[in-house]
Image: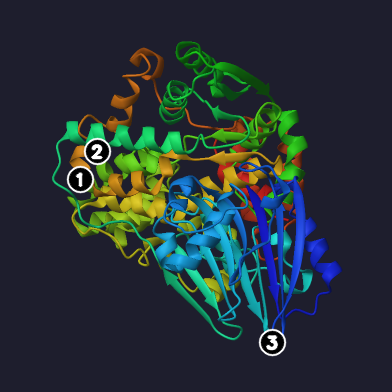
Amino acid sequence: MCSIMGYYNTEQSFEEIKWLNRTLSHRGVDNRSVKEYNLTEKKLFLGHNRLAIQDLDAQANQPMESERFAIVFNGEIYNHLELREQCDSSWLTHSDTETLLALFNRFGIEGTISKLIGMFAIALFDKYEQKLYLIRDRVGIKPLYWTYQQGEFAFASELKGFAPHLKTKESDKALIQFMSFGYAPSNNSHYEDIYKLEAGHLLIFDGETINKKRYWSLPNNKIDISYEEALEETERLIRSSINYRLLSDVEVGSFLSGGIDSSLVSSIMQQSTTGQIKTFTIGFEDKNYNEAGFAKEVAEHIGSDHYQYIFGVDDVIALMEDMDRYYDEPFGDASALPTMLLSKFTKEKVTVALSGDGGDELFLGYDRYFFTDKYYEIFKKMPQFSRDILSSLGKLSRQDKLEKIAYPMKHPTKENLYAVIASYLKPWQMESMFDREFLYHHFGSLDYLSFQEIESFNQKDTFDNFSKIDFYRYLPDDILTKVDRASMKYSLEARVPLLDHRIVEFAYSLPTDIKLKYGAKSILKDILYKQVPKELIDRPKMGFRVPLQEWFRGEMRDILQDKIASLDERFNKSYLQKLFDAHQKGKNYENIFWNIMRLN
């Protein structure tokens, strides 16, 4: 795992570029390098910070070059040794970076990408054609930002890699989106004119123009298959994926929460390894939020060498400043804090850890999918005048779920309903929270909640659509961003075997009735129950939650009140004070308040 960055046609000096590259050095502590390329008329800088995982020798450092290409690369290509057999090359290293150079030379850009099993953010400069290619992996496991301002093109793994003159204005649109979702979705970032390269996309810059192309997307067609066949193939793919992700010249461990996904990954990893693997879990002092005991029971059953760390509110307060620094932009998922602590704790023992992320999106594990479906059917049967009444009552109701349901009744699709249920802020809360003129000047309306831009909706399968909304938005912009920044802060490489693109493609080719034959995530559960006794796993899902609700009434109460008082004129502080008072009396606005706390 590493960081990459680059500048084209910049006024920055070589020393200034080296300084910018150094701001990303937490992502790779084993080597730091910048190289300058003098082109026909302009200059190109490529920078890299290396965390050595495969081939620890200095010959594998980056930037790396062939006769035609120069490359900086963040990620891992797990099948690169197999792909070497397709190249006629004399190898100087056994690094996947050298493999990539040979593949690009032989098969071209998209021909190479189609062969890769891995996670990657790649910058490739073609010396012959004087073109720069940016490539982000299919799922968005590895981050990549870019900008093109006044003739200067730049890219980086994180926003801190961009020079201050490129980050002159915060995006008001991204602020509104952040308060609703907890992140700026799709290609947006916290700064105007700086963008994320979307997952599964390729960007081509020829020195003057930018072209973007989607090279991969989810399958739309469903296959005819039995449940037993789906179970067998899913298990085969998961075992293959985990075996690939054990490729490393340093020790690999596994995160273990005791839930379905991490238990499945850890148990199969232990079966695939000759020695005893190390597993890691984190728990809370508050027993209502603590799953560490469940993880310990699973670890004892699979025979792993298990480590756990219990933390409290003081750990969180100490980490909040670090969270702002390493996430670069407001990030609303409070589970980032325990993920950071888990990564720090894990890095003391290993350099690579497997994570169980992705199972809920691929195999329909979120409760909100079922909640949306259930209540949509109820409201669909109501006459229109009843929907109008409920829509207006939403602003008055004390019931949070009723409030979230009321808005979509004027736009009655399941996708609209799901979008509101999945958001932190209800539309009418946004109208109360922000200065009204500011809100409508920058956003005009809230129809964006319908997610009309999702091109792959299946008109007959709304569960599939709910999952795709999360796959294209929540997964890369929340879950994977959280894990990447938390692990990279401590130079720990996190690998996500359930998001191998072969598993993703197969999961989305399965009909929903197969996925849900025995309930949510039944395929993953049935695979797991062959490895671990059902009684160790079969319990209500807790999730990686943080007791913010209680903390905002206790240890973090004054910190929150000071933060509300410090907000600028874009916010309606009197409304937020009302929410604060209501929270102290028993209502729960923890998600809204946590997002407020994350604003700089």
Which residue bears the numbered disc 3? 40
User: Which amino acid type is marked by label 3?
Assistant: Thr
Q: Secondary structure at mark 2?
A: helix
Give neighbour class at mark 3: few <14, some 14-19, many 20+ (Cα, 10 Å). Answer: few
Pointer 2 local density, CA inside 10 Å: few below 14, some 14–19, many at least 20: many
| Image location of residue 288, percent across then percent down | 54, 21
- Residue 324: image x %, image y %? 72, 49
Whether label 3 touches label 1, CB < 8 Å: no
Do we see residue 184 in this rendering?
A: no
Pointer 1: what residue?
511
The answer to whether the residues at label 1 and label 2 have Cβ atoms under 8 Å apart is yes
Q: Nearer the viewer, residue 251 or 335?
A: 251
Q: Residue at x 33, y 50 (%)?
A: 466
Residue placed most toward the observer, 83 or 234:
83
Q: Which mark is residue 477?
A: none
Depth check: give the residue in front, 260 or 18.
18
Q: Amino acid at mark 2?
A: Lys
* Residue sitting nearer the eye, 170 or 305: 305
Mark sitting earlier along the chain (2/3):
3
> Which residue shows up at 58% across the image and 46% down it?
94
- Looking at the image, tell me whether mark 3 or mark 1 is earlier in sequence order: 3
Q: Which residue is mark 2?
A: 515
